[in-house]
Image: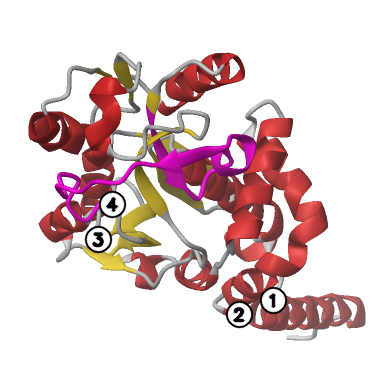
């Protein structure tokens, strides 16, 4: 059978086009093409550093790595660990160790615990403003003038420890109020300017450490256990994430922030009216070099 020259030319052009497309796909190092159908679910417990790192991850995954969507799923702390273990949540980036060791022990066979991403110093415990000069220990609280301990989420380890161990150990007459991190910070901002006596739950990293002058209380009876010891902040990912999504896995494994990095990120989010995505995008404009190694590692994993 004879093939016309025009038909032969069309067929040759089609073969060449397909070959070029195939080569391009195999060698592609771009961000959006390979990941445009991917979605990712991150656990969110509402803690300020968790909101910040989640917002940063969402912006990078969607804008730099081309993911279709990164969903932030808000859950109680214990349910986040269970969600990662069960695969409903891909990653949780706010694991405090040793504080969360019991939660991690329950799911350790179904998750991978990555190296710490936060490279700064941590602090955690009951705190008072520095203007309460005679209150330096939990043992001083009954004579401090404060009538309550302003707490955070009921499921938080420090809330549970305060209720079950600290208050009984020191026979405190103060009422424990557990609501949310946002509510606690709002109350701190209301009371602090008037130098009212109050007790709250403080931790670092957090912008509160640069916004307010306060001190963590000594715990001579060690009722808080190891909660006031320096901790490492890290991530857990589902055990199958490395094989299912090597790009995301590489990013989580490489991301690293110092205390200054995280504080400035949180400040940008505050300036953006607590819009984590908008604040993270603004922070990235000035700090892209900080996250470049993680972005590069993710792109190389494609």
Residue for badge 1 = 29
Residue for badge 3 = 98
Q: Is residue 190 above or below residue 42?
A: above
Disc 3 residue crowd, few under 14, some 14–19, many 20+, Cα 10 Å: some
Residue for badge 4 = 84
Find the residue positioned furthest to the right: 6
Marks 2,1: beta carbons within 8 A: yes
Front residue of this view, candidates 286 and 26: 286
- Find residue 115 and report its horizontal and vertical position in percent: 39, 72
Q: Which residues are magenta?
A: 200-227
Disc nearest the viewer among 3 and 1: 3
Q: Is residue 302 left or right of residue 24?
A: left
- First-in-chain label (2 vs 4): 4
Q: Is residue 7 above or below residue 224?
A: below
Pick the quarter of the image with the C terminus: bottom right
Q: Disc 3 and disc 1: Cα gap in Å?
A: 39 Å
Residue for badge 2 = 300
Residue 215 in magenta stretch: yes
Residue 285 in magenta stretch: no
- Find residue 111 and report its horizontal and vertical position in percent: 24, 63
* Image point (70%, 84%), residue name: 23
Disc 2 residue crowd, few under 14, some 14–19, many 20+, Cα 10 Å: few
Marks 2,4: beta carbons within 8 A: no
Disc nearest the viewer among 4 and 1: 4
- Find residue 68 and report its horizontal and vertical position in percent: 59, 47
Q: Which mark is residue 50?
A: none
């Amino acid at each position: 059978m004879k093939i016309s020259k025009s038909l032969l030319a069309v067929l040759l052009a089609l073969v060449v086009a397909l070959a070029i497309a195939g080569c391009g796909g195999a060698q592609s190092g771009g961000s959006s093409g390979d990941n445009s159908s991917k979605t990712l679910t991150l656990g969110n417990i509402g803690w300020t550093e968790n909101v910040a790192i989640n917002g940063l991850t969402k912006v990078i995954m969607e804008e730099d790595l081309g993911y279709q969507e990164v969903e932030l799923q808000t859950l109680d702390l214990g349910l986040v660990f269970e969600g990662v273990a069960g695969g409903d949540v891909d990653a949780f980036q706010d694991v405090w160790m040793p504080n969360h060791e019991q939660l991690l022990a329950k799911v350790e066979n179904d998750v991978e615990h990555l190296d710490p991403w936060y490279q700064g110093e941590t602090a955690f415990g009951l705190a008072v403003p520095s203007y309460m000069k005679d209150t330096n220990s939990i043992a001083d609280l009954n004579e401090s003038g404060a009538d309550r301990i302003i707490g955070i989420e009921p499921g938080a380890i420090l809330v549970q420890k305060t209720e079950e161990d600290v208050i009984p150990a020191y026979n405190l007459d103060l009422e424990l109020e557990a609501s949310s991190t946002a509510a606690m910070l709002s109350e701190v901002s209301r009371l602090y300017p008037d130098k009212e006596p109050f007790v709250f739950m403080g931790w670092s990293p957090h912008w509160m450490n640069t916004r307010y002058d306060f001190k963590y209380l000594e715990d001579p009876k060690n009722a808080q256990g190891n909660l006031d010891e320096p901790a490492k902040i890290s991530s857990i990912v589902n055990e199958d994430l490395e094989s299912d999504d090597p790009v995301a896995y590489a990013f989580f494994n490489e991301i690293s922030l110092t205390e200054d990095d995280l504080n400035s990120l949180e400040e940008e989010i505050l300036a953006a009216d607590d819009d984590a995505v908008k604040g993270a995008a603004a922070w990235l404009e000035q700090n892209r070099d900080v996250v470049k190694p993680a972005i590069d590692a993710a792109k190389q994993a494609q």
